[in-house]
Image (spheres, helix red, strand yellow):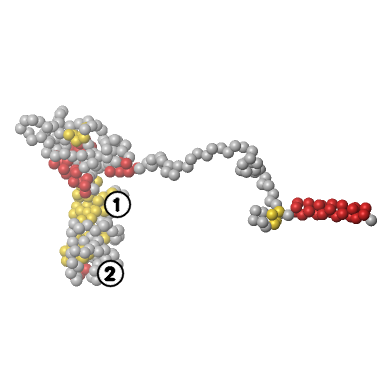
Amino acid sequence: MKKNISIFIVLTLALTLVFASSVSAATYVDEAGSGGTPPKPKTGAPVDSGTGAATTGQKNAAQPPVDDDPVLPPVDDPTSDDDDGDGVPDALDLCPGTEDGDHWFTYDTPGWNIWKFSSIGWATRNDTGKQQGPKGSFTLDEMAGCSCTQILDTYYGEDFVGKYSCTPGMLEEVAEDVKDGLLGYELVETVVVPALSSTPTLSTFIPELETSYKLIASGTALAGDNIQFDAQYASVDGVTWTDLVPGYEQEGPGLLNLIVDGVDSGWGAYNAAHTYQIEYIGTGSAIGFHIYDISPENNTGGLSVDIYKPIY
């Protein structure tokens, strides 16, 4: 009987150990104490038993530092290009190819108040005798990048080439034309556009087809209700000028505008001198000007338009 009890106890213990072993293999308890299936190891990412860090079987390559403020290559600014090296950007240079040592034409050396362009800029003779020396100073910027030779050749035309040097009066005139955007252009006609008529006033000058001209509108005229107007803007007090005619805003911004060839293309931003300039491309026919108004019969005065053609 004792022998049978002993055998029974041994069998019971053996079964208990087998059951406990199977439970341990089937149950996973995470760090939080919850059960679950143990995670599978990641393929290709064994764990370094020494540090616990993931490895790939190779040493990690050193990574370059990230530059938070990288230095970018300079961006080419076409407005700063200066192909002839005269200090005037190509965008503003009306005379490309300016050369150092521009000759004097009539003089072997600079005369009094006779100017030339050289490596030191515009220069003139300064004599210690009775002459007064230079009366002014001119820069290539004021000449739109043009030397004396180029001014005589392209601005004053063939009749002047080889005959005269650049006098102060000539350069002052050139500087003024550069400022007004008219270097290389000459006035050919002034057209007076009456405010009283809606019939186009035609120029006697016939522009060449597809040639660029300059139109300069100037002056003011009067409409009814004490309205003053210029080529594009109107006012009732002479102080505030607007694109919409005061009291007639419902007619739109075109009312009392100066129209060219039946087109209201605009004359630009308001100018206190009431002078406006636009480019005009020739059509091979006379230019027609009129002032658009719904009731032109009570208007007085008119506007003027200067037509400039290219010299060369």
Image location (x, y in percent) of residue 7 = 90, 53
Q: Which residue is mark 2?
A: 249
Residue at the extreme top: 108
Image point 12% across, 32% down: which residue? 126
User: Please, which residue is most extreme toward the left here?
Assistant: 130
Residue 171 position, x and y percent, is 17, 41
The C terminus, quarter of image? top left
- Seen from the viewer's position, the closer of residues 126 and 213 is 126
Tag 2's secondary structure?
A: helix
Query: Circle 1 is placed at which residue position?
Result: 281
Crowd rating for badge 1 (residues with CA inside 10 Å; few <14, some 14–19, many 20+): few
Q: Amino acid at mark 2?
A: Glu
Percent x, y for residue 250? 29, 70
**Secondary structure under badge 1?**
strand
Residue 168, quarter of picture: top left
User: Which residue is pictured at 27% across the width and 66% down the height?
Assistant: 244
Q: Which mark is residue 306?
A: none
Q: Is residue 291 above or below residue 2?
A: below
Q: Please report whichever mark, 1 or 2, sits nearer to the chain's N-terminal start.
A: 2
Amino acid type assigned to the residue bearing label 1 in the image: Ile
